[in-house]
Image (spheres, rainbow, N blue to C red):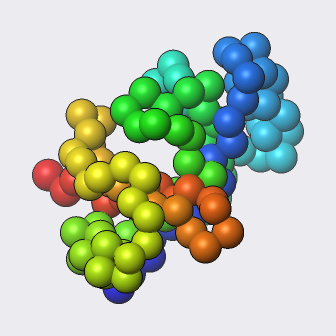
């Protein structure tokens, strides 16, 4: 299995806190690479897989995950995770912005967003 990137997902209170957080991480060298209104992703220009996402909400799932893990084959990971008996928080689904993903709870209670980008 190939892991492509891991990034923390930070829930913010509102749009004002999202903007102040974006500006703060900008001081550390992060640049905005995606803004969907309710989620903004920041990345390092020199290492684009070093990322942070800021969420005001999660529009297609029951809660904001604690972290995201991009894998090469999300279907294979989903099969292994469900076979293990781990709690699936959100079923495997294709999203309109080009990812296929599911949420699973780890043994400490953290929610992990596991995803693959659609390849066109």
Residue 28, position in %: x, y? Answer: 83, 46
Q: Is residue 17 left or right of residue 36?
A: right
Residue at screen point 29% across, 52% down: 91
Q: Is residue 48 left or right of residue 4?
A: right
Residue at screen point 44% across, 64% down: 87
Q: Is residue 14 left or right of residue 104?
A: right
Quadrant of residue 110 within the rendered picture: bottom right
Residue at screen point 49% across, 32% down: 58
Residue at screen point 60% across, 32% down: 55
Q: How many marks?
A: 0
* Up-down relation of residue 52 to residue 86 (above or below): above
Residue 81, position in %: x, y? Answer: 36, 76
* Up-down relation of residue 19 to residue 94 (above or below): above
Quadrant of residue 24 within the rendered picture: top right
* Up-down relation of residue 69 to residue 107 (above or below): above
Q: Is residue 3 left or right of residue 101?
A: right
């Amino acid at each position: 299995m190939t892991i492509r990137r891991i990034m923390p997902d930070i829930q913010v209170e509102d749009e004002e806190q999202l903007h102040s957080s974006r500006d703060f991480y900008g001081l550390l060298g992060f640049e905005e690479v995606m803004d969907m209104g309710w989620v903004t992703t920041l990345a390092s220009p020199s290492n684009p897989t070093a990322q942070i996402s800021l969420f005001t909400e999660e529009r297609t799932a029951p809660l904001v995950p604690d972290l995201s893990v991009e894998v090469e084959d999300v279907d294979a990971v989903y099969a292994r995770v469900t076979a293990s008996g781990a709690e699936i928080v959100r079923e495997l689904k294709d999203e309109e912005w080009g990812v296929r993903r599911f949420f699973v709870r780890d043994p400490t209670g953290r929610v992990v967003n596991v995803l693959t980008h659609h390849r066109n």
